[in-house]
C-alpha cells in the first residue's frame, strides 16, 4: 500500500490552473531559438542543484555550481560539497535527457536505482544504487538521539518499490502533473529505500515525473530552489513529518503535503516567469544601451548574467558567445573600460560583476517587478 493521491478542493484546482497558465506563458519565451535561453536554462539548473544540496547541508553558490557544470573550478566550494554537487548534476543531466525519450519510456527499478547511484556514487560504503539491507532512521534536527521517522522494514522495500513503479507507469494518470510528481516524491521519500541519499533522489524523481509529463523544459520543472530556502526547508521537513508520521503509515492523509507542494510549484513558477520576463526585457535594453557605445551584440552573453547578479567568468562567456580565448579577453577588457563590468579577484580567480554603467538599466528593468504572492493566502 502507498500513500493515496488525495481529492483536490476548489482552491487546489484554482492554484493548479494558475500554475498551468504561468507555465504556458513560459513555454513561449524559453524556446531554444531565443538566444539568452541557454544561459537561463543553465542558471535554473544550477539553482535547483544548489537548492537540493543545501537542504542536505551541502551549501554551494549558484555561481560555483554553474562553473562546475561548465567544467570549471569553483571559486569557493570545498571538495566534499563539490562531490555532492557533481553527483547531483549527473542525475539532473540524465533527467533532462529523458524528458523527451518518447513513448518507449518506462519507469523501472534500474532507472530509479541509477539516479540514486549518480547522486551517491562517491559514498561506496552506503551501497549506492542498491536497496538497503537494514533499518533506516531520520533523526530530529534538534536532537540527533531522537528518531523523527523510521522507514519500513527492509524486507518490505522491494515490494513497495514495485508498487511505486507500477503506479508511476499506470496509476492516477488523469491526475494533474504537479500532483503526480508530488505523490511520487512523497512515496519514495517515505519508503526510504536506500541507506542515504533518499531526499535528493526523491526530489529528482519528482522533477523527472514533471518534466516527462509536461511540455515545460525540464530546467524549469524543479521546485528545489524554492525548497532550498531556509524557511521553506523547515516547513518541508515539518509537513513530511506531519503527513508521514513516525513510522511507515501510508493510510495517512496526504492532503497537507499536496497543498504544500502545489504552493511550492506556484511560487517557483512565479519566480521563473518573473526571471524570464526580466531576462527578456534586460536583453533588449542592454542591447540598445550598449550598442550606443559601440559594443558588439555578442557581449550581451556577459552583460546579461552580470545583470541578474551572476559572477561572469571568462571561460563561461567564451563558451556562451562561441569565441576564442583572445577575443573573449579583449571583449571583457572593453566592457571593463566602459564600466559595464567591474573586475574582481586575480588570475584564475578573476570574475566580473555589473559595473556602474549597468545601474540605470538595472533600475529601469526591475522597477516594474512585483513580489510573489502566496496562492493559498486568503484574498490572493
Image (cartoon, rainbow, N blue to C red):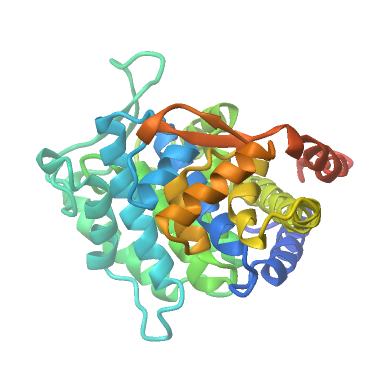
Task: Point out residue 84 in the picture as x, y percentages from the top left corner.
Answer: 29, 40
Left or right of residue 154: residue 279: right
- Of 84 and 185, which appears nearest the observer? 84
Quarter holding residue 336: top right
Q: Which image quarter is the C terminus in? A: top right
State the residue at coordinates (76%, 50%): 293
- Of 323 and 54, which appears nearest the observer? 323
Task: Point out residue 6 in the picture as x, y percentages from the top left corner.
Answer: 59, 56
Q: Which image quarter is the N terminus in? A: bottom left
Residue 167 visible? yes
Left or right of residue 300: residue 71: left
- Of 286 and 175, which appears nearest the observer? 286
Left or right of residue 323: residue 339: right
Give the vertical position of 154 relative to 162 (above or below): above
How many marks the image carries: the answer is 0
Task: Point out residue 236 in the picture as x, y percentages from the top left corner.
Answer: 52, 35
Residue 185 visible? no
Give the vertical position of 167 relative to 362 (above or below): below
Left or right of residue 72: residue 110: left
- Of 89 and 263, which appears nearest the observer? 89
Quarter holding residue 14: bottom right
Task: Point out residue 273 in the picture as x, y percentages from the top left corner.
Answer: 72, 55
Looking at the image, which residue sits at the far bottom? 103
State the residue at coordinates (52%, 32%): 233
State the residue at coordinates (64%, 48%): 303
Give the vertical position of 52 relative to 156 (above or below): above
Amino acid at each position: 500500500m502507498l500513500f493515496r493521491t488525495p481529492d483536490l478542493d476548489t482552491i487546489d484546482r484554482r492554484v493548479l490552473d494558475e500554475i498551468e497558465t504561468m507555465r504556458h506563458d513560459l513555454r513561449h519565451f524559453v524556446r531554444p531559438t531565443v538566444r539568452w535561453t541557454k544561459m537561463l536554462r543553465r542558471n535554473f539548473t544550477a539553482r535547483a542543484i544548489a537548492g537540493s544540496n543545501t537542504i542536505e547541508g551541502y551549501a554551494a553558490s549558484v555561481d560555483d555550481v554553474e562553473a562546475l557544470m561548465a567544467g570549471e573550478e569553483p571559486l569557493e566550494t570545498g571538495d566534499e560539497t563539490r562531490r555532492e554537487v557533481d553527483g547531483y548534476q549527473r542525475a539532473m543531466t540524465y533527467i533532462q535527457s529523458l524528458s523527451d525519450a518518447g513513448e518507449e519510456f518506462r519507469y523501472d527499478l534500474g532507472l530509479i536505482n541509477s539516479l540514486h547511484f549518480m547522486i551517491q556514487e562517491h559514498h561506496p560504503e552506503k551501497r549506492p544504487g542498491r536497496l538497503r539491507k537494514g533499518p533506516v532512521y531520520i533523526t530530529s534536527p534538534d536532537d540527533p538521539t531522537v528518531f523523527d521517522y523510521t522507514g519500513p522494514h527492509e524486507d518490505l522495500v522491494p515490494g513497495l518499490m514495485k508498487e511505486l513503479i507500477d503506479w508511476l507507469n499506470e496509476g492516477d494518470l488523469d491526475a494533474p502533473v504537479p500532483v503526480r510528481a508530488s505523490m511520487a516524491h512523497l512515496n519514495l521519500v517515505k519508503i526510504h529505500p536506500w541507506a542515504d541519499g533518499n531526499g535528493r533522489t526523491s526530489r529528482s524523481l519528482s522533477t523527472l515525473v514533471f518534466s516527462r509529463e509536461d511540455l515545460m523544459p525540464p530546467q524549469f520543472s524543479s521546485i528545489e530552489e524554492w525548497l532550498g530556502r531556509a524557511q521553506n526547508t523547515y516547513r518541508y521537513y515539518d509537513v513530511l513529518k506531519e503527513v508521514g508520521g513516525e513510522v511507515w503509515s501510508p493510510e495517512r492523509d496526504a492532503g497537507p503535503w499536496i497543498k504544500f507542494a502545489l504552493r511550492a510549484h506556484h511560487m517557483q513558477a512565479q519566480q521563473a516567469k518573473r526571471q524570464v520576463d526580466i531576462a527578456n526585457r534586460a536583453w533588449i535594453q542592454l542591447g540598445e544601451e550598449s550598442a550606443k557605445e559601440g559594443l558588439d551584440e555578442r557581449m550581451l552573453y556577459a552583460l546579461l548574467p552580470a545583470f541578474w547578479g551572476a559572477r561572469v567568468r571568462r571561460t563561461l562567456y567564451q563558451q556562451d558567445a562561441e569565441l576564442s580565448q583572445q577575443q573573449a579577453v579583449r571583449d571583457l577588457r572593453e566592457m571593463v573600460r566602459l564600466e559595464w563590468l567591474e573586475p574582481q579577484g586575480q588570475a584564475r580567480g578573476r570574475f566580473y560583476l555589473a559595473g556602474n554603467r549597468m545601474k540605470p538599466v538595472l533600475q529601469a528593468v526591475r522597477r516594474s517587478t512585483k513580489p510573489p504572492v502566496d496562492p493559498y493566502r486568503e484574498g490572493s
